[in-house]
Amino acid sequence: MFRGSIVAIITPMYEDGRIDQDSMQRLVEFHVEGGTSAIVAVGTTGESATLGEQEHCELIRRVVDLAAGRIPVIAGTGANSTTEAVALTGCAKQAGADAALLVTPYYNKPTQEGLYLHFKAVAEAVDIPQILYNVPGRTACDMLPETVARLSRIPNIVGIKEATGDLDRLARLKSLCAEDFDFFSGDDASACEFMLKGGHGDISVTANLAPRLMQRMCTAALSGRQDEAHAINARLDPLHRNLFVQSNPIPVKWAVAEMGLSPRGIRLPLTWLTEDAQAVVRAAMQQVGVI
């Protein structure tokens, strides 16, 4: 359903934490014009953990309206409560999102059977394409390939965003999962190799700043043009590395503001990028040529 560079878009905010709707419109246009394949709205990079359920649903609806069918919208709807995940996924369907992205339940450390039953319950409750999201570095919960394989046989669970950075895991997943199941990298640093090894795209932080270059790299990798993909990825590498100098989305929100695309706002408990880290991110942006 989705291929190439998929941006995990930030949620632009004023300094008092209010969502800046005008900047949201600018960002959607930036990605439509930049050739981004799809937008993930209200994911980790969109500060989903700091949004209330109502504003979460309203923001999904806003991005869908702004996209206006020109670019697919994948709504972040994961939660550590199955009931909340069902509710948010229902909001995504009602808003007209093209798919939902659901992170593994965080903090409560479910068993593999608990993970299977959680995602199965959401899939059965809401008839919308759903993409699993495994990021154990943030959730303290690793969904194993065998569990993913079971879920891949549920008709509206269509893919996984695998953010471990473990390229060997991709081969294991591909050998176990349903033939029509899609695999997306959630780790910009290894995404090029992930796609060259058979992945279908990258749900990207870097794409917030360099959509055209990211799409070119992804297109080359998906087409098997290894040398071209590696060359473009080498240009992007400073952003892949330094957009994680502090916890995501702290660096990327500062960088988007530095480009004049959003104001300087972030919600507690996240804080604005520190001055020493700003120098590191600015240098990376200058290397890549986005400022």
Image: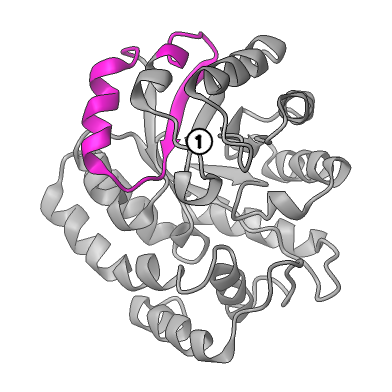
Left or right of 142, for residue 237: left
Q: Is residue 102 visible?
A: yes
* Residue 163, magenta (yes or no): yes
Label 1, on which residue? 133
Residue at image x 30%, y 68%? 237
Q: Position of residue 30 (x, y in %)?
A: 58, 59
288 w.r.t. 42: above or below:
below
Within 10 angstroms of label 1, few (less than 14), some, or many (20 or more) residues? many
**The one of 173 and 76 positioned closer to us in this rendering:** 173
Q: How many marks?
A: 1
**The one of 263 and 159 positioned closer to us in this rendering:** 159
Q: Position of residue 47 (x, y in %)?
A: 68, 55
Which stretch did the figure color magenta? 150-179
Residue 261 sits in which quadrant? bottom right
Residue at image x 60%, y 76%? 254
Q: Position of residue 54 (x, y in %)?
A: 88, 41
Q: Position of residue 117 (x, y in %)?
A: 59, 15
**The one of 186 and 230 positioned closer to us in this rendering:** 186
Left or right of 262, for residue 131: left
Mark 1 element type: strand
Residue at image x 32%, y 67%? 236
99 w.r.t. 242: above or below:
above
* Colour pattern: one colour
Q: Residue furthest left?
A: 227
Residue at image x 11%, y 54%? 227
Q: What's the residue type where badge 1 is placed? A: Tyr
* Residue 227, magenta (yes or no): no
82 w.r.t. 35: above or below:
above
Residue 58 sits in which quadrant? top right
Q: Is residue 1 visible?
A: no
